[in-house]
Amino acid sequence: MWPDGEGPSHNGHGRASSGSEVVVIGDQVTSTAALQPTISNIHNSTKCHIGPKFVSISQTVHSNEVVKGRFLGLELVSPMKSRRLRCSVAVCVCWAFVVASGLGIYFLCIALFVPQTRIDIGLNETWYLRRPDWQALAPSSVYKMQFLRLPVKYVTFGHSAVNSCDNRRDCITEVRNIQRDHLERFGDISANYLVGGTGLVFEGRGANVIGAIIPGWNSKMISVMFLGDYRQSVLDDAQIENVRTLLKQLVNDNVLDPAYELYGYCQILTYNVSPGPNIMVKMHKFEHWRNENASKCLKRYFYLSCPRYLWDLVKNSTRAERVLCSIASLLVILCIFLIVYFTVIAKPNEEEPDTAPWNISREMWLAEPYSYTNEIDSVFEPLRLVIIQHSAGSECHRFASCASVLRNIQGYYIKVKHRDIPYNFQIGNDGRVYEGRGWRKEGAHTQFYNRCSVGIGFLGDYREELIGHSSVTALQQTRAHMLLNAGVQMGFLHPDYYVVGASDIQRDGTESPGSNLYRAIQQWAHFDHENRFRNKSCDEINAMFKRN
């Protein structure tokens, strides 16, 4: 149709030149009208291409080969080839988020968690005894310690309504008796603090532990129990002053609200006697006392006849009612038993911290008072002879258990031998030195040598030929040297004293102090390797040193 050089020009897609109404397909020229596809919403554009394959347009087209998503606020348009890579990135980000969340929860809930414990208030007075000082027993295994939300706003006074006490030993004994009774009922001693005669103050449950005195009030108050029955006993000035000091310290330690309120037990549970009329008349000496319901405090106890009440109740009921009540009571008891059996989880006993000092006096291990008639003759002072023995009994590794062992030994000697504990000093397996008869008191540990020696007994059986024998520790030996050095400094021991085992001089063939302990003392600097004291009396020993 066109001469050479005058026909329409072709591009690479077989289209005629611009403005032409025909296209070339193969070698044939075809009208564009015959090949025009039916496509809607296509604007007139010079960039629209039509050919054997589908055309592309500048308008945004959503097709199945385009993936469009939004992640972290960024729009991602991914072709099919990039789907796997994008999915892997998303999975990694998700796992990183999970791990970071887990670490955050662990750090906040576990790493930063600090278990709450009993607060030790900053009161350092001779009249204030912490739980280890009065040898408190461990709480019951079913008791779960709960803590107050500090500061609390209330303080209550009560009394034990049993024995009073006016010296340290009797008061400790009374507090321990109260704790034994309360262990079965409350899991531990019920009051936060207890007050004995002459102003002794005992730490009970402590400053921040919920007590077991008044139901409904225990979680918002500090309870103080006075030892004795204050219908007859009288509150003395030392008790008042020391309790006021205790309360001020609790305020300083943020245990008590500065505007706390003080009440007697009978002011909360009205028509009751506790804390007793002799305390109530002196409550005005405590500045935070409130006198509400003070008129409802009784001066003596009134007891209802419970058997008579139950008899009247049974007598006035029908047989059917009695049977039904009995069945209901049995069911209630059975339900309580099942609840306790399946819900109470036993836990190991929480031992009290063993904070006693290394040198324990007779008063601290609650020794029975004993009147001594024999003292070391001054002619033998300062003493030259130290005799080491063992008790050949049970071991003890804590202050409370060693104190109990010593009380048992002393009780045996007083009851059977009619004399006090035989040793001048004892050394426990806990490494503490316990005063027996003490310095300048004649012992009863080694026959024929008691007048001129000091006897030291190690608690336990140190015979290695026995299964489960005791083994002397470095701490025990260190404390023994500390005791002996103190004796030299105080003038009770001569600087050139000698150490021997009981078997070195005893004439009855004793095995004391046991092979394990004997081998240890042989290494001591003052041990007598020449056995110079065997078969000699105290007078002969004294004469021997005087000649030198």
Image (cartoon, helix red, strand yellow):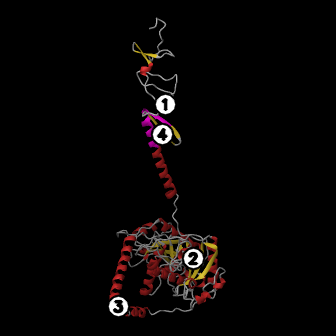
At label 3, the amino acid type is Thr
Between circles 2 and 1, the one closer to the viewer is 1
Identify the mark at residue 222; answer none if there is no mark. 2
Residue underneath mark 3: 318
Q: CA distance from mark 4 to mark 1?
A: 25 Å
Whether the magenta-drawn stretch holds residue 91 is answered as yes
Q: CA distance from mark 2 to mark 3?
A: 48 Å
N-terminal label among 3 and 1: 1
N-terminal label among 3 and 4: 4
Q: Residue 404: where, in percent of width, then height?
A: 46, 78
Residue most extreme to the top: 4
Between circles 2 and 3, the one closer to the viewer is 3
Decide: few, some or many residues near mark 4? Use Cα within 10 Å; few <14, some 14-19, many ≥20. Answer: few
Identify the mark at residue 316; answer none if there is no mark. none
**Residue in view at x 46 percent, y 13 percent:** 10
Q: CA distance from mark 3 to mark 4?
A: 81 Å
SS label for mark 1: loop
> As drawn, is 206 to the left or to the right of 4?
right
At label 2, the amino acid type is Ile
Q: Residue 316: where, in percent of width, then height?
A: 38, 93
N-terminal label among 2 and 3: 2
Residue underneath mark 1: 41
Residues drawn in magenta:
76-92
Residue underneath mark 4: 69
Q: CA distance from mark 2 to mark 1?
A: 85 Å
Q: Examine the residues drawn in magenta and state their main secondary structure.
A: helix
> As drawn, is 236 to the left or to the right of 147?
right
Q: Are marks 2 and 3 in contact (CB under 8 Å)?
A: no
SS label for mark 3: loop
Where is 254 relative to 332, above or below?
Answer: above
Decide: few, some or many residues near mark 3? Use Cα within 10 Å; few <14, some 14-19, many ≥20. Answer: few
Q: Residue 416: where, in percent of width, then height?
A: 41, 86
